Amino acid sequence: MRGRDLGLRGIALNPYNPELAGMVGYLLITCGDADGATILQRAVAEAPDVPAFYGAALILALVEQGG
């Protein structure tokens, strides 16, 4: 959980960086952490020009969660 904690701390220290939030959200999703989808969703909403794979990861996470 150390990586999760460090990622969330990074977001807390710089909440206006959607690229950071998107990467943390993506990495949390790949680790099976459901909070990653929420973080990634917020990042995509704040900056639609984030890398395209964020959107793909978000879609896959939402499908997996059933929502």
Image (cartoon, rainbow, N blue to C red):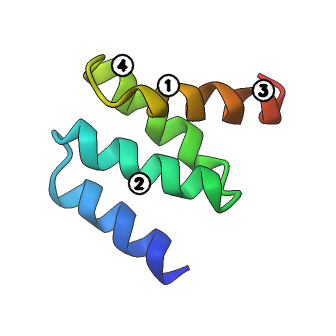
Q: Amino acid at mark 4?
A: Ala
Q: Assess disc 2: are there few (<14), some (14-19) or many (≥20) residues with their C-alpha within 10 Å of its C-alpha.
A: many
Earlier residue among tags 3 and 4: 4
Q: Quadrant of the N terminus?
A: bottom right
Q: Amino acid at mark 3?
A: Val
Which type of secondary structure does the marked residue at label 3 adopt? helix
Frontmost of labels 4 and 1 is 1
C-alpha distance separating marks 4 and 1: 10 Å
Q: Which residue is mark 1?
A: 55
Q: Which residue is mark 2?
A: 24
The percent coordinates of residue 38 (x first, y second) are: 53, 37
Q: Which residue is mark 3?
A: 63
C-alpha distance separating marks 3 and 4: 18 Å
* Front-lying residue, 54 or 9: 54
The percent coordinates of residue 44 (x first, y second) are: 38, 25
Q: Assess disc 3: are there few (<14), some (14-19) or many (≥20) residues with their C-alpha within 10 Å of its C-alpha.
A: few
Residues at marks 2 and 3 touching, judged by CB atoms closer than 8 Å: no
C-alpha distance separating marks 1 and 2: 14 Å
**Where 7 sits versus 49, above or below?**
below
Q: Which residue is mark 4?
A: 45
Q: Amino acid at mark 1?
A: Gly
